[in-house]
Image: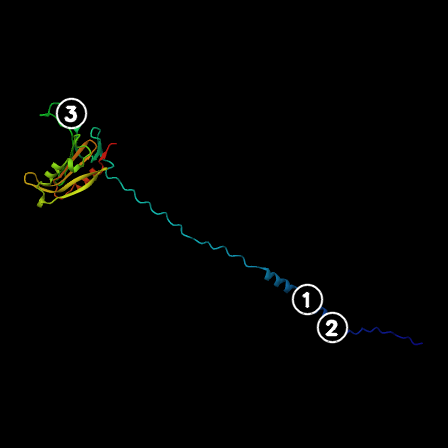
Amino acid sequence: MEENTLTSQTPLSNPNGKSKLLLVGFLVVTLFSFIAGFSLGKSVTTLKPAPLPPQISLTPTPLPSEAPAKETDPTADWKTYTDTIYRYSIKYPPDAFISTPEDCWEECNKGSSSGGCMCNSLTINLKGYKHSFASLSMEIFKLNDSDKGKPTEYINRAIIDSTRKLSWEDGKYIEEDVKIDTVNARCLRGRLVDIEEGARWAYYLFFTKGDFNYYLVWIDISLERDYETTLNLILSTFKFLD
């Protein structure tokens, strides 16, 4: 009796099955790559560059305009003389020598003045330099009732006329109206060439205020008019008392 011997044979591989596996694997890899690429692209497109810091516009702040320098008062350290009788005050340099009506009365009371006293004048003598010397003298008179309210030119017509006839150099002088505090004053000024007293600059001023007539004489023997600025400063400090 023959025995049928069964020989196990290795089954042949199926080419169609292998191809399918390769195809599936390829599709999986492709899908995965597509998904990864899509996600990466999306993340890249959604990334926005960090905003730049805002630009700061530097507008220069204008410097405050410089305040004008305060003008210094050249008479700030000067002394002041006040006359309560004739109702005025005036300043003078601290190194000047003055003679006041009070000094006059003091001397008069001592009996050192002969022929009576007429203490109505103020004299300011400035210290000289370069052999120069200058002084301002002011005499004040109470007006007569008939002269009150009349202009200075009328009250002083005689003395103004005589002043015009002084020995002015080449017969020339300047006559003008100037302001003394709040009133108009008549001023004659120029260079005198008096033979006895020598050459000098002279200023004559006449003005009235209330019941009084004021007569000022400025003499400067410095031929360079060294003290003219000082004179103007002194006159600028003249104030009537209210």
Dot 1 falls on a residue whose secondary structure is helix
- The residue that appears at 66% across and 66% down in the rendered structure is 34
**Residue at image mark 2:** 19
Q: Position of residue 154 (x, y in %)?
A: 15, 37
Residue 152: quarter of image: top left
| Side (left or right) of 205 relative to 76 | left
Is 140 displayed left or right of 76 in the figure? left
Residue at point 18% right, 41% down?
A: 177
Q: Is the residue marked by circle 1 packed among few (<14), some (14-19), or many (20+) residues within 10 Å?
A: few
List the single residue furthest toward the bottom. 2
**First in sequence: mark 1 vs mark 2:** 2
User: What residue would you read off at disc 3?
Assistant: 106
Q: Position of residue 163 (x, y in %)?
A: 11, 39
Q: Nearer the viewer, residue 106 or 51?
A: 106
Q: Which mark is residue 90?
A: none
**Could you give the CA–CA distance between mark 1 and mark 2, rounded to whole angstroms?**
18 Å
Circle 1 is placed at which residue position? 31
Determine whether the residue tagged by mark 3 lies in a helix, strand or loop.
Answer: helix
Select label 3 or label 1 by which is in front. Answer: 3
Crowding around mark 2 (Cα neighbors within 10 Å: few <14, some 14 to 19, many 20+) is few
Q: Mark 1 or mark 3, which is nearer the start of the sequence? A: 1
Q: Is residue 62 above or below residue 77?
A: below
Residue 127 rendering spot, x and y as whole percentages: 15, 36
Residue at the spot 23% in from the left edge and 35% down from the top edge: 239
How would you rate the neighbour count of disc 3 (Cα within 10 Å): few for under 14, some for 14-19, many for 20 or more?
A: some
Q: Is residue 142 above or below residue 174?
A: above
The residues bearing labels 3 and 1 have C-alpha atoms spaced at a distance of 131 Å
Mark 1 in CB contact with mark 2 (< 8 angstroms): no
Q: Earlier in the sequence, mark 3 or mark 2?
A: 2
Q: Amino acid at mark 2?
A: Ser
Kind of residue sitting beneath label 3: Glu
| Mark pair 3, 2: CA separation | 148 Å
